[in-house]
Amino acid sequence: GTLVRYSRNANQKLLEGCRIHLGCLGIVSSLTLDIVPYYDVMSYRYDDIKLDYMIDNLPNMWKSCDSLSVWTSGFGRGHGTGYCWAVYRYFMTEDEKEETLSDRHTIPNKSKDSGVLCDIPINRYCTDPNNNSMTFRHTGRKPWYDGLTLTMNECQETSMTIVDLQAELFVPLVYACDAIRTVWETTQNWTFSSPWGYVERRQGKELIIEIDGTGEVLAPQKGLVDAMEFRQVKGGDNGWLSPHPVDSLGIHISFNGDETLRPLVLKRVSEIERALKTKFGAVRAHWGKLAPLTFAPKNVEKVYGEGFKQFRQLCKVHDPKGKFLNRHMRQMLFEHDESPLYAKL
């Protein structure tokens, strides 16, 4: 093989083409990264937020912090119906005092609908609920490498013993509130697992879940969907295959990982794709997650346009014999290609 180097100075345009390469351009042997000074992340998690409150106040919730994640298991049928939880994050220099956040950390239109602070140990995402060492306090101050994730502890990955199937779709941020309501309407008859991270405790030999603020004690429930997350994603990276070329709402869905449910999961993802596309136009998707309609050969070129065509040509230059193409990539990239180059691969 040959060695090719792309940089901002020499070939900026092609660098943007390689930014998302899907493994089709060859093996990356070295990478130079921009770095930023060390910082801490101060997080506040609030449970039992009414879904209607969240959607109505979402723009102001974004403005009130540096990073916001909104999770829900409450769109359909399940223990969390009608509610969500949110994590407000603030980025701080190492010597900055937490007292400086007193003016910044304000909850928009604070009321009983805006949730209650979760300041107790909870189980980590996708970890064994019977392993007490996997608990952590979501509310609190941590180094950036722990505070920005759900599964890192002291810069080490925790055991993700619960397997899930994932999808993540992107719509322009200007449609965020309407898009969330569209997802809610589409999923109102789906089954949802018990809300992740709510108060969990032992009662004899039976694991139970106590939903904060309601006084109800309920046996854990497993549904088709474990949880959904909504997050604001910055656009404008100019990547040819960028899933969010403009500021976007990321709609992440963690489905039950039972392989027997995969056909149903694919059907349900398609329902959301179709609903979002009908109302907001082209929907983009995370390249490493499920999106059967968006990534169908007949649709993907329409969605990604000229950038997709340029990337296809770059593949031919880098890998003229198609050695780095698997069946999925060959079908998605070249099924509707007029060039005969890969026709017999």
Image: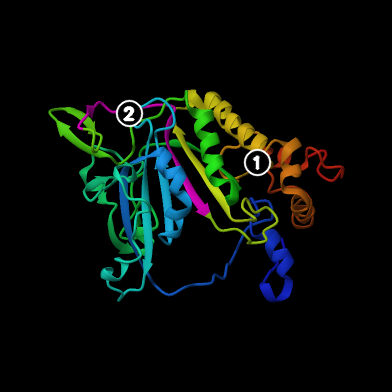
Q: Which residue is mark 2?
A: 79
Residue 42: name its quadrant.
bottom left
Instruction: Give the percent coordinates (x, y) of residue 35.
Output: 49, 72
Q: From the image, which quarter does the C terminus lie in?
A: top right
User: Which of the two marks, 1 or 2, is nearer to us in this view?
Assistant: 1
Q: Position of residue 61 (x, y in %)?
A: 42, 53
Q: Are marks 1 and 2 in contact (CB under 8 Å)?
A: no
339 part of magenta stretch: no
SS assignment at label 2: loop
For residue 153, say whether it is visible. yes
Give the residues drawn in magenta, as a range: 215-232
Asked whether the viewer can see residue 150, the reply is no
Which structural element holds mark 1?
helix
Residue 70: x and y in percent read 42, 46
**Amino acid type at image mark 2:** His
Name the quadrant of the N terminus: bottom right
Task: Give above or below for 42 relative to 312.
Answer: below
Marks 1 and 2, the one that precedes in the sequence: 2
Q: Amino acid at mark 1?
A: Phe
Q: Where residue 280 is drawn, which disc sits there?
A: 1
| Residue positioned 69% across, 45% down in the render | 325
Q: Nearer the viewer, residue 298 or 276?
A: 276
Q: Report the front residue among 119 and 162.
A: 119
Above or below 39: residue 232? above
Is residue 228 part of the magenta span, yes or no?
yes
Within 10 Å of disc 1 (Cα), the crowding (few <14, some 14-19, many 20+) is: some
